[in-house]
Every structure is written in structure tokens, then in C-alpha cells.
Amino acid sequence: MGLPFRHAVCMAALLSCAAPAMAGTVPADIVFTNGYIYSVDKKDHVYQALAVRDGRIAYVGGNARAARYVGPATQRVDLGGRMMMPGLVDGHMHPLEGGKSLMGCSLDYLPLTHDEFSQRVRACTANPALRRPNGTLVVRGWFQEAMKPAGVRLTKADLDRIDARRPIVVRSTFGHTTLVNSAALRMAGITAATKSPAGGEIVHDARGQPTGVLEDVAQDLVERVDPPLSADENVQAARASLAAMREQGITGFLDAWALESDLSSYTALQKSGELTARAHFAPLVEPATGADVAGNVQRLKAIAAQYDQGPTGVDPGITVRNVKFFMDGVIAAPELTGRVLQPYYVNAGTKGAPHWVPGTSLGPDPYFPPAILGPLLQGVVQAGFDPHMHADGDGAVHIALDGVQYVRDHLPHADFRPAIAHDELVSPADVPRYRPLGAVPVLSFQWEKEGPDTVDAGRDFLGPERAKAMEPAWPLYKAGARIAYGSDWPVDRLNEWFALKVGVTRTNAPEAGEKYAHPLGDAPGLPRPEVLRAITMNSSWELRSDTQTGSLERGKLADLIVLDRNVMQVPAADIANTKVLLTMVGGRVVYNRDGTIALKAATGGAR
Ligand SMILES: [Zn+2]
């Protein structure tokens, strides 16, 4: 649908030229007026009105001119002062796992005592419907770091007391730890003699027996016990994840560890017209294969050739342009699998009278040694992919930045957008490197608060200096880094609005209690425009869709949301309570809370 050229130029100049002829204006499908339309354009302009035509934004500006876009078939929506903003783009999540977490047995991310844990798992064992077809009970939503009192360690014996006969597999919310019972170890064939795989650990007790705790890649060893879901079950989980996303206002996401099952499930939903968010996928490069650059590139290209649907269109599609690498695990106890530059602290005193001193462990060896990482990243970038590196500890971040530096040195003209996810600890010397390297820190703002994982499971082990510097959003922002947001769902419950609130306040929810009532660390939170930009424009940039999504500007896709409150104006704590009233993707309404906004569901888009 071509606008007359003169008119297009005029509109691009943002209403600064003389009124165009009425005849030159093609009516829109929908015209919103009387809104607080927060554009996230270069200057965060706020407008009153926005028109959608053929799935794109035909106009954004004042009320008066919006009237020109109203034709006989145009739907008109009076926003009554409500806030509209770009749809949320989640730059790092695990949507299929998220969908699974909404089904089956879950511990619901709750802080639990040993007894409460046992009671809840036992209750699940009593419900046969919760078992896999092979008899295994899979338990999700285990907030391992929040076990009460702090420092509680569970082993296979705890699960054996609940059910010694049938396998139990408990998945931690951080995704780095799986706890299994003896029956599961037997079924998996894990014995005292089984060696830990590269990039993972089978934890052993003092007598050399496996404790039932499997870290990182070692979790793959229980695949026989908790086999992959069937294709139908996966599609069901993917469907559930999209429903949760629509309600949150998510219109685009990066699946930050895309397996075949992820790609095929969302592709199936795309084919049946059920894909309601723009889906980006990052297949994983396994640490053990790091030296095989050509083999990895060939495999990644084959995945992209099979699934990537090419340039972004009005309807949500499937994109395979990112590649996932794990540099380390997590810096929280009990894992302490994050790679750090200075040793973790250990308690040289007693439980009652602790005395924390530097120990000797820097965490595991880097999952990709620097000599392997540089050439690997170079090969992946040359093949047209953007690396997305999980790096949690400052040691891993340092290696990731060095890897990016290696590619910049060897391919000085390469156009690539490296992302470093999590960045919970960054050496002050590395903070200024993100900007010149064009590396995007993908932060999970909801971690920037006092809580069991930061206070109880973090502070003592890091020592006072590093504990104060955890979650360095502020220094990264001051150093000019382009900060993007990624929820990492289902590591936490999917709650983008709570995360944005924490990004601003660095405080926990009031329900978390007095113990966690203070802001985390010394640094302030980010300004509101910056957190909103992180989850819209900057995450779109990370995913190379910034010319199409991330802001409300003429010509861009109509991916937008309407909120029940103005997150730029309400008290910061209240951002957490935000409800999305309307979610629109490519001009199509995919979520309309209680029908609050009078708009037909099938509206918009020529399709
Ligand atoms: Zn993740």
C-alpha cells in the first residue's frame, strides 16, 4: 500500500510540513486517539494518536491529524489517556521450558524448608497423572537457592525417602542443577565410575558415590529417565508459553537455547496461525565441540536453512540468526559454577560463628578456553550469526569480551551484534569494554534485588567488595553500554513488569519481608526510559529487528501494547502491578484483557 511520496516525506518529517491533501491519505484499519503513546523513538517522544494500516504504523502524532486516517471502515479507539508503548521484546528466555513449567508438578519458585519440599514432592507422587509415561515424576520450579534455612543441601537420599522405587527428577529454576533419586541414577546408568562430561559435573560424596546432584551438561545424563516430550506435548507447551507471553505484552522473544523441539514446536504453531510473537532462536554450540569450527558452522547453517523464514514480515515468523554459548554456570551458591576472577570465599569459622575468607576456587574451568573461543566466534560470525554468550561471573564475562575482541581484530568490518547474557558480576576494568566492542549486556533486572539468591546465596561467597558490585546495570549504563532485557524465564516466573520495577528500584516486593527490604548494593536503579528501552528498542537491536520493531514510528510494524497504568508516571513500586490490556502483533489483536479496549480480535493486516 504505497503512500504518495510527497506525503511520506512530510510524515517522516514528523508533522513539520504543510498539511497534505486529504486525498493523499489512505484510510487506516485502526486509529487510536487520546492516548499517552510512549514511542521509544530517538527522543522518547510522547504522542496522542496512532494509526495502523496493513499491520504497520501508518501514523503517529497528534489527535487532529489522526482524523485524516479515518475512513468508513476504520475502527476508532479512544484510549482515554491510557499508556500505549511498543510490544515487549524479551532478549533471552527459554519459552518451551517456560511452557512446560506451566504444566505438571511444580514447586512454584517458593522458598521451602526441607520438610515443605518433601511434602510437596510427596503430594505430586500421589497423583499418577503427573508422571511421565515411563513412570518418572518430573518436578519443576525448585528454587534451590531459596531453600530454608540457607545452606540446606538435598541429595538422592531425600528423594529416596519419598519414593525409592520410581524415578524422581527435580529441575532447579536456575536450570543448572538437577536432583535425582537412586532409582533415576540406576535408570540413567550413573555409578561411582561414571565420569563427569565436559561442561558439567556429577557431584560425588566423600566416599565417591554420586549424590544425585547433576550440574550443567551432566543433567543430560538423565535423558533416559526424563525423555524428551512427544511432539504433541511440546506443541502444547509452546502454546501455553505464547498465551503467557500475550498476557505480559511480549511480541517478540529470543529462545536462548533452541533445541530441535523448540524450533519444530513454534514452527508448527506458526503454520497453524497460532504464533503470536516474533520468534528468534539461538541453537547451542556444545563446549565439547568448540574446536570443530567448520562442523559447528555447517550444523548451524543447516538449522537456519531448515527453519529461518527470511526477512521479518507483518505476521510473526521464525528467525534463526543467533547462536548460544555457555561460558560458565551461575555465581550463586550452592552451585558456585560461575567463573570468577578472584576466588570465592569460604567459611573458615563455624555455622554459628562464620568467618568468611578467600578460598581457592575460581569456579569451573572456562567452558570454552580462550584459545578455542576466538576462532569459534569468528567462524560463527563469518557465517552470518550473532553470538549470544551466557556469562555470569566476572571471569566468564572477561573471556566473552576477549572473544568479541578477537573477532573485531580479525574481522574489523564484520557487522555482528554480540550479546553477553546475565553479567551478574563484571570487573570494573571490563565495564567500559562493552560499548566500543558493540557487546550488548542482556540483563535480567529482576535479579537486582535483595533475595535468597543474592543475599543468602551470594554475598558471603563473593566477599564484601564484589557483593556490593553485583548486578552492575548502573555502571554499564554510565559506560554507555546498550543494555537489553531478557527474563530468562522459567528461571524466574514470567513477570516482566515486576522485573522492570526492580530495574528502576533495585528492591524486592514488599511481601519478601524486612530481611530483603533494602535496595541491592550501592548503585541506583536505571531511569525509567532506560528500562523501557532495554525491553523494546535495545532488545530489538540485539535481534536485528530494530528497523521493524522496538519503537512506535511510522512504517514500523504495529507491535504494541496498551497498559492499565502509566508506567512513566505511577510510583516506581507500582510498575510491578501493571496489567496489559491489549497486545497487538503486526496490527492483529492477540490479547484483549476482559475486552477492555473495544476492538475486534481479528482486526487489521491484509492477510
Ligand atoms: Zn538462560
Image: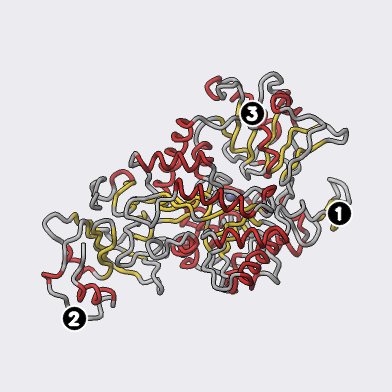
Asked if marks 2 and 3 touch (Cβ < 8 Å), the reply is no
**Residue at x-position 59% and y-position 41%:** 109
Is 42 left, or right, of 448 in this rendering? left
Q: Secondary structure at mark 3?
A: loop
Per the image, the residue denoted by label 2 is 18
| Measured Cα–Cα span from mark 3 to mark 1 | 43 Å
Per the image, the residue denoted by label 1 is 355
Q: Amino acid at mark 2?
A: Ala
Asked whether residue 579 appears in the rendered view, the answer is no
Nearest to N terminus: mark 2 or mark 3: 2
Numbered disc in front, either 1 or 2: 2
| Measured Cα–Cα span from mark 1 to mark 2 | 73 Å
| Measured Cα–Cα span from mark 2 to mark 3 | 70 Å
Determine which quarter of the picture holds residue 447.
Answer: bottom right
**Residue at x-position 40% and y-position 39%:** 268
Q: Quadrant of the N terminus?
A: bottom left
User: Tag 1: Cα neighbours inside 10 Å, few (<14), some, or many (≥20)?
Assistant: few
Where does the image place residue 179, in percent across and percent down from the top left?
69, 34
The CB of the residue at mark 3 lies under 8 Å from ligand 1:
no
Q: Is residue 392 above or below residue 138?
A: below
Is 170 left, or right, of 31 in this rendering? right
Numbered disc in front, either 2 or 3: 3
Per the image, the residue denoted by label 3 is 224
User: Tag 3: Cα neighbours inside 10 Å, few (<14), some, or many (≥20)?
Assistant: few
Nearest to N terminus: mark 1 or mark 2: 2
Asked whether residue 219 appears in the rendered view, the answer is yes
Is 164 left, or right, of 529 in this rendering? right
Q: Secondary structure at mark 1?
A: loop
